[in-house]
Amino acid sequence: MGLNNFKTLFKSGFIQYLISVISIGITALACIPLAKTQGYHVVSFLLLFAVSLLSIFLTVGPVVLASTVAAIIWNFFFIPPHLTFHIDKTEDILIFGLFFIIALINGVMHSRIRNQEKITREREQRTHALFQLTKELSVASGINEVIKIAGHHTFNYFHFTPVFLIQNENNALELISDLRHEDALTDVELEIAKNVHNTSVISITEIKSKSLPRKCIIQPMIGSKINPGVVIIRSDEIYDNLPSNLWDAFLTQISNALEREFLAEMAQKVRFLDESDRLYKTLFNSISHEFRIPVATIMGAADSLLNESNNPQVQNALAHEILTASLRLNRLIENLLNMSRLQSGHLSLRLDWYDLNDLFNKVSNDLKDELQPFLFEIEYSDNIPLVKIDFGLMEQVLYNILLNATQYSKPGTKIRLTAAFDEENLILSISDQGVGFHHERINHAFDTFYRANQNKTGGLGLGLSISRGFVEAHKGQIQVNNNEDGGACFVIKLPTELPSFITF
């Protein structure tokens, strides 16, 4: 046992020493009736019992004092000749020696057992604290939640609030902990923190502030792959009293959790950038392909009109080609603008009462050329009332779905548009007899830039995605299923109130 451990072993308060002396004195006074008899051996057992009892509650120093005092009192007052330290009988000398040794060993052993129990209890508390910290950090989501959990457990166990500086994606330290204005980090602390983060070497510095100077301990948080940041302990005495092994274990768990969240955020950003890059390439390739065809048509027809003397019939045909290509370009641009409106959240509804017959006639007239090769049917009951919708948006919805049906159906097949009114819901159905959707990909039908047949030209894959956005803007639902006899069927369900002048 080292000198420091020896000093710690006998470090006790004055009260404990006083209690030990008084307890032995009271026990001796209770044994005075046995002083003049041959029962002085019984007194030794009673004093030994008192020393053993004291060892349960007191530390080693007071117990050693109690053993010494008990031995002296027994010798001076109870072993013949009385009131002297002389012992006549050899067996009394032996008993006195054994009494002192047994009392001393018994007291010390009891104290050591109690100290060991205290150490075991403290170790169990530390293990439980570390377990609770690890358990909560394992399910924490996000750097802020990790910092909150770390600060809570650190304060509960070590009784101080740490300050965390976490590196960002630019490798610069950012303050995460909330500080009052008077506790704001000084420029010196920030500079030392940067140096600690770069060198991974702990720094203990005395910081002079407006108030009294204080000790500032800045420790690096070291991870397995990266160092997520530093932790600052701002206290004069707390660091010297920290159980270093437990605090290091705490700091390791916090560092690992912060590293995990930092790497997860970085991975998410990388995935987002990859997805953005993929969408950009898809959009660029689609736009360059889709725009090239109508632009080439317009350029070719315009060149023919300028450089050749064509008869009126040919000129009309060329003008028609220019108009058709221009309409296609306009449709592509409208889809891009509509997708931008949906993604930016700047879409606002202009609801009013409309007759479905006007909506269907407008859409079928706009798609007259595309629907001409097909058997196009419109079915709805005569008692359907006026509906409250955004006419322009719903026109785009039906236009995109019907155009999609013409692109993936064979000429001569049937395309059917039906409407029904169910309580307060308008139900629109558009079915065709085309190729339908692959059963494994039907859930992606409304995804941005998705096309059922990648080899088929015509469109950017935005029409259905825009249609879903417009329907959901009406707080409605849209879904698609494959027909049993082939083709796809889109069903749109829109909540719409009844006009006040309509009664059934």
Image: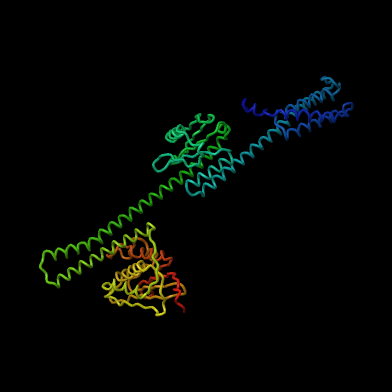
Task: State the image coordinates of residue 124 (x, y, percent, origin top left).
Answer: 62, 41
Query: Is 423 in front, or is 234?
Result: 423
Q: Residue, x 53% and y 37% (percent of image)?
A: 248
Q: Does residue 192 sit above or below 294 in this rendering?
A: above
Count of marks overlaid on the render? 0
Viewed as shown, does residue 109 lie left or right of 296?
Answer: right
Task: State the image coordinates of residue 256 (x, y, percent, origin top left).
Answer: 48, 43
Residue found farthest to the left: 309
Work out whether residue 409 can be spotted: yes
Q: Quadrant of the N terminus?
A: top right
Query: Is 93 in front, or is 33?
Result: 33
Work out whether residue 200 can be spotted: no
Q: Residue, x 27% and y 65% (percent of image)?
A: 458
Query: Is 440 in front, or is 500?
Result: 500
Q: Residue, x 84% and y 29% (percent of image)?
A: 29
Viewed as shown, does residue 210 lie left or right of 10?
Answer: left
Q: Does residue 184 sit above or below 11 in this rendering?
A: below
Give the image quarter of residue 287.
Answer: bottom left
Q: Does residue 10 sit above or below 425 in this rendering?
A: above
Task: State the image coordinates of residue 326 (x, y, percent, origin top left).
Answer: 23, 65
Give the image quarter of residue 280.
Answer: bottom left
Give the image quarter of residue 403.
Answer: bottom left
Viewed as shown, does residue 75 lie left or right of 372?
Answer: right
Colour approach in the figure: rainbow
Task: State the image coordinates of residue 42 (x, y, percent, origin top left).
Answer: 84, 31
Q: Residue, x 49% and y 34% (percent of image)?
A: 218
